[in-house]
Image (cartoon, helix red, strand yellow):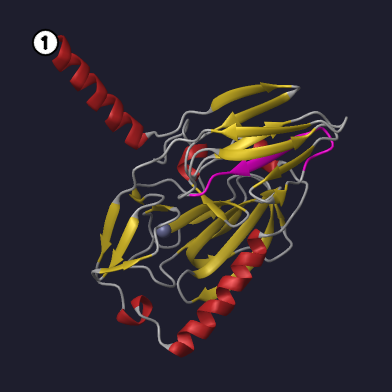
Amino acid sequence: MKHLFLRIFSLLLLSLSTTFPLHAEVRDLGNGIRLEGSFTQGGMVVGQAPAGAKIQFQKRNLPVAANGVFVLGFGRDDVSPQTLQITLPGGAQQNIALAIRKREFQIQKVTGVPARTVNPDPKDMARIEKEQAAVGSAREVVSLHTFFRDEFVWPVKGPVTGVYGSQRFYNGEPRSPHFGVDLAVPHGTTIVAPADGVVSMAYPDMFFSGDTIVLDHGMGISTSYLHMSKMLVKKGDVVKKGQPIGKVGASGRATGPHLCWRLNWFQSRLDPQLIMASSKPQ
Ligand SMILES: [Zn+2]
């Protein structure tokens, strides 16, 4: 009987963990170094180090604010542990092995997608490469803003129809994993900035993602908005949390109106639902 209860309890935990994989966790590493966030694939972690510390992670010298704040993220396929290298103001170096949790990702089948967008021809491929380079450089923006520390709001609220990390099959063919959270809301619904930011890209009519916006929230943390029917801001605009930035649509490779909302730490894709754990999408 006890065994059965344990079994039910662990199943319950498992089902809860697939819905909310993600409670923020605090790790105090001593020497004035403190980390807080989701130590899991797709997680974002905000750090505090002594002022003047230098920080390296995944071969990158991280931007560090004058007060010692920094941020990092774990990609979908990052393995545990990941090493954080900290050089304290006195010169002492500390290598910290960050254990991260592995996640199980769903398989999602998407049918009824135009064949041209599943197997692009060489001319489309050239266009796709140019567009991906534009997105890549928008995500590479290095600023010292710390807008990512604010509590984010949902850019739209509605049913979640796609989650981070799922392996996708388009018309039966395996393609890249899905990296955002899809929110199915009517065409024309207003999309708001989830936190303060600076528009680092506003690109019309991309092959896969249609009208696409990238917002920089500082230190490599950016959010992306795909498949929009209208963009209300342009590159360089400073936006405030809650400010309208565009309208929902189905532009690019989409089967119906929805917002695909993404979170990035430089080129690593993070899971927006992890930073929204305390707020429901509808
Ligand atoms: Zn999506």
Asked if 219 appears above or below 130 in the picture, the reply is above
Asked if 100 appears above or below 134 in the picture, the reply is above
Q: Is residue 79 visible?
A: yes
Q: Is residue 267 magenta?
A: no
Q: Which residues are magenta?
A: 64-75
- In the displayed structure, does residue 37 sit left or right of residue 67? left
Local crowd at mark 1 within 10 Å, few (<14), some, or many (≥20)? few
- In the displayed structure, does residue 48 sit left or right of residue 252? right
What is the quadrant of the N terminus in the image?
top left
Q: Secondary structure at mark 1?
A: loop
Q: Position of residue 107 (x, y in %)?
A: 28, 54
Identify the image quadrant of residue 29. Answer: top right
Q: Quadrant of ligand 1?
A: bottom left
Q: Nearer the viewer, residue 91 or 35?
A: 91
| Total numbered badges shown on the rendered structure | 1
Q: Farthest residue to the top: give it.
A: 2
Q: In the image, what residue occupies the spot 38% across and 63% down?
A: 257
Q: As shown in the figure, which amino acid type bears the numbered disc 1?
A: Met
Q: Nearer the viewer, residue 76 or 197?
A: 76
Q: Nearer the viewer, residue 156 or 117?
A: 117
Q: Position of residue 39 (x, y in %)?
A: 52, 34
Q: Nearer the viewer, residue 182 or 169?
A: 169
The residue indicated by pointer 1 is 1
Q: Position of residue 52 (x, y in %)?
A: 85, 35
Q: Is residue 66 magenta?
A: yes
Within 8 Å: ligand 1 and the Cβ of disc 1?
no
Q: Farthest residue to the left: give it.
A: 1
Asked if 194 appears above or below 125 in the picture, the reply is above
Q: Position of residue 98 (x, y in %)?
A: 57, 34
Q: In the image, what residue occupies the spot 58% across and 45% down?
A: 194
